[in-house]
Image (tube, rainbow, N blue to C red):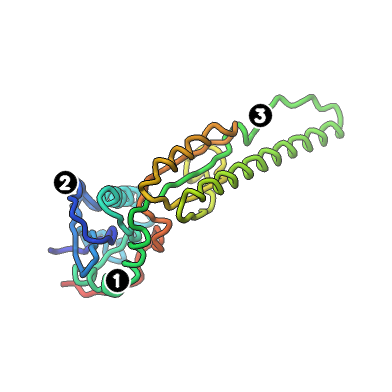
Amino acid sequence: MTGLRYVYAVCRPFDAPLQSQITGVGGAPPRLLRHHDLIAVVSEVPERDFAEQPLRAHLEDLDWLTETAHAHQNVIDALTVVTTPLPLRLGTVFHDDSGVRVMLEAREEGFLRTLDRLSGRVEWGVKVYAEPEAEEQPREPAKVTSGRDYLRQRRRSRQAHEEMWEKADRFARRLHETLSECAEDTRLHAPQNSALSGAPGRNVLNAAYLVPRRNSEEFVELVDRTKNEEPGLRVELTGPWAAYSFSGEEPGGRESDDMSGENS
């Protein structure tokens, strides 16, 4: 093969076939590269886009990055159906198969420990938003006849806003405690910026839960029961995903030694 090797994930050997029509980054089909008791899922990508310098430039191009991330995720999703993948960071690239095997050899023990811990488990994401109408609380203001009336209205508005956030915080904390009891592990992520995510409302909970596959239906039902529990608060569930939040791999960037191998 010519070109560079893009690595999507590492997993244990598995027998079930991947979806026959799946394509990866750059349109190339993924293949399995075995090393001892590990499989690296790779595809060929062109140097003009994925050598160190052009890749750095591309990572500043939002359209290119979105397309690449979508293709990367398609492969991870297909793997999640048939096995437990350990996703690697977006843009993990090596010169050739030998470079991938060197990486697998160097990190073999850690990969195997993580795969054993994640085996048979998936990640579910839960977000809670304060709806825009609840956050803004639009009301027809009372007629202001004096400075005292103005200050009184400001105080009432501030108190209402604080009460709304206290309610949202209590709900989010209670929901997280409840869901944590049904999960083997949890991660609390920073709230998302609505200007960047495009989701309406303010994000007050952004959490990930590691759940055994066999308990996923129970977990989903538990989340569904909370969706209309508090007016003005919206609960969103996503998944099941490969266990990104629990893999020890960062979601973006690239390995510091990805391009350290020699071209064949």
Dot 3 alpha-carbon crowd within 10 angstroms: few under 14, some 14 to 19, many 20 or more: few
Q: Secondary structure at mark 2?
A: loop
Report whether residue 177 is seen. yes
Residue 41, quarter of picture: bottom left
- The first of marks 1 and 3 along the sequence is 1
Q: Nearer the viewer, residue 252 or 118?
A: 118
State the separation of the CA atoms marked 2 and 3: 53 Å
The circle on residue 20 is 2
Q: Is residue 160 above or below residue 59?
A: above
Task: Indicate the amino acid at tag 3.
Answer: Pro
Q: Secondary structure at mark 1?
A: helix
Dot 1 alpha-carbon crowd within 10 angstroms: few under 14, some 14 to 19, many 20 or more: some
Q: In the displayed structure, does residue 62 sit left or right of residue 172?
A: left
* Residue for point 54% across, 31% down: 228
Task: Indicate the amino acid at tag 1.
Answer: Glu
* Residue for point 21% across, 75% down: 262
* Residue for point 39% across, 59% down: 252
Q: Secondary structure at mark 3?
A: loop
Dot 2 alpha-carbon crowd within 10 angstroms: few under 14, some 14 to 19, many 20 or more: few
| Residue 88 x, y percent position in the rendering | 33, 60
Task: Indicate the amino acid at tag 2.
Answer: Ser
Q: Nearer the viewer, residue 148 or 237?
A: 237
Q: Count of labels shown?
A: 3
* Residue for point 70% across, 41% down: 162
| Residue 96 x, y percent position in the rendering | 19, 68
Q: Quadrant of the C terminus?
A: bottom left
Q: In the displayed structure, does residue 76 sit left or right of residue 135?
A: left
* Residue wearing tag 1: 108
* Residue wearing tag 3: 138
